[in-house]
Image: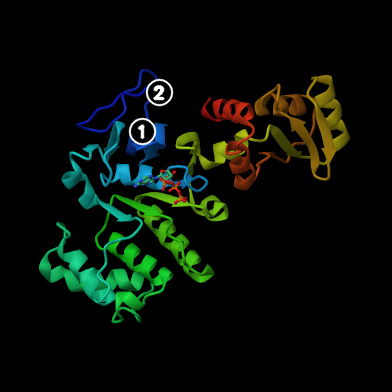
Amino acid sequence: MTTSFDTEHGAGVTASAPAPALAARTRGLRKVYRSTVAVDQVDLDVPEGAVLGMLGPNGSGKTTTIRMLLGLVRPTEGEVELLGRRMPDNAQHALPDVGALVEGPGFHPFLSGRENLRRLAAAEPRLSTSDIPKAVEDALERVGLGIAAHRRYKGYSLGMKQRLGLAGALLVPRRMVVLDEPTNGLDPAGTREIRTIIGELHAEGVTVLVSSHLLAEVEATCTHVAVLHDGTVVAQGELDELLESGSPGLVVSTPDGDKALQALQSNRIPGKLTPEGVRADLTATSAPQVVEALVHAGVAVHEVKRERTGLEDLFARLTQRDAEGDRLSEVDEVKA
Ligand SMILES: Nc1ncnc2c1ncn2[C@@H]1O[C@H](COP(=O)(O)OP(=O)(O)OP(=O)(O)O)[C@@H](O)[C@H]1O
């Protein structure tokens, strides 16, 4: 896929297949803090309507990337486009459509959650004064903070602070919501609620960018993933494709296991018997070729599925510090 940077409209120009519309993207993004390279050569694509999970070890550059996307930090080099607008110069046009929960939202410690949210709501260009009370109550309810809304922010637990930050992001309908570690400090019930809210936003067509350390959460909630390591993106794309790319195996359910294995062998496809049928190795062949070989041999194929690795395996392999060569070859595979 070839892309170009169209600052006015945000649409990628392709020579061949049409590019997916992108809610956010970066090209050659780099941020250097004195001697620390926090982010380097990051080309991130966040497709419209996706729930993209940004994963990476501590210090891999997730927060810095998010802050540059939102115009909170100016890149040392590179370009950022958010909802078709160049950032940070067009922040005032892009940001009203973007709800964000980033580290350390500036809430006032001696005001209640509700009062803090009202102050935030007053600064929302899309909210009229008369709509503020309802918008605030709706957002508090949505994040499960209704009962504690009268209490001072100062006395909130970390999880309650996270919920209030999330309420601020959801004060008005958004085209995109950016959540930096939203489950930080939340108990399992709170984590489940965040998952539900992300699911609701996705169903409404809102693009969600969420950074997380919780791989299981990302696997359960995200359609897309970007893995960062040492400030660079080592893999990105659809979650299913990334998971499948790590395991070149096809699991075939069939009552004719022996016949299937024979068919694989006569087509020089490595395979083995499994309880449900056979597993064909896809290192040197494709899934359609396996199916064709089996069907041609008269094997009753009931079900075919690619083997998937867990996100945890994929993440470990991509971010392994002592396996640079392996990591790079896998990235090529993933991007191919
Ligand atoms: N304001 C800053 N000044 C100096 N160095 C910074 C600053 N912000 C980030 N860094 C450094 O940049 C690197 C990337 O940090 P960043 O917070 O973006 O990573 P992260 O992936 O979000 O980490 P975590 O998962 O721990 O939140 C780290 O080495 C960090 O110490």
Kind of residue at disc 1:
Arg
Q: Residue furthest front?
A: 35
Disc assigned to residue 20: none
- Please report the residue visible at 68 percent of the width from the left and 39 percent of the height from the top: 307
Disc assigned to residue 17: 2
The nearer-to-camera label among 1 and 2 is: 1
| SS at circle 2 | loop
Say few, some or many: other residues with alpha carbon within 10 Å of mark 1 (under 14 / 14 to 19 / 20 or more): many
Residue 84 lies in quadrant: top left
Residue 15 lies in quadrant: top left
- Please report the residue visible at 69 percent of the width from the left and 24 percent of the height from the top: 289
- The answer to whether mark 1 and mark 2 are in CB contact below 8 A is no
| SS at circle 1 | strand
- Please report the residue visible at 37 percent of the width from the left and 42 percent of the height from the top: 65
Give the image location of residue 292, x and y in percent: 71, 25
Q: Name above or below for residue 144 compared with residue 294.
A: below
Q: Quadrant of the N terminus?
A: top left
Give the image location of residue 278, x and y in percent: 80, 36
- Is 295 in front, or is 114? 114
- Is 212 in front, or is 206? 212
Say few, some or many: other residues with alpha carbon within 10 Å of mark 2 (under 14 / 14 to 19 / 20 or more): few
- Please report the residue visible at 67 percent of the width from the left and 29 percent of the height from the top: 287
Kind of residue at disc 2:
Ala
- Which sits earlier in the primary sequence, circle 1 or circle 2? 2
Residue at which label 1 appears: 30
- Is 104 in front, or is 35? 35
- Is 17 in front, or is 7? 7
Q: Name above or below for residue 315 compared with residue 145.
A: above
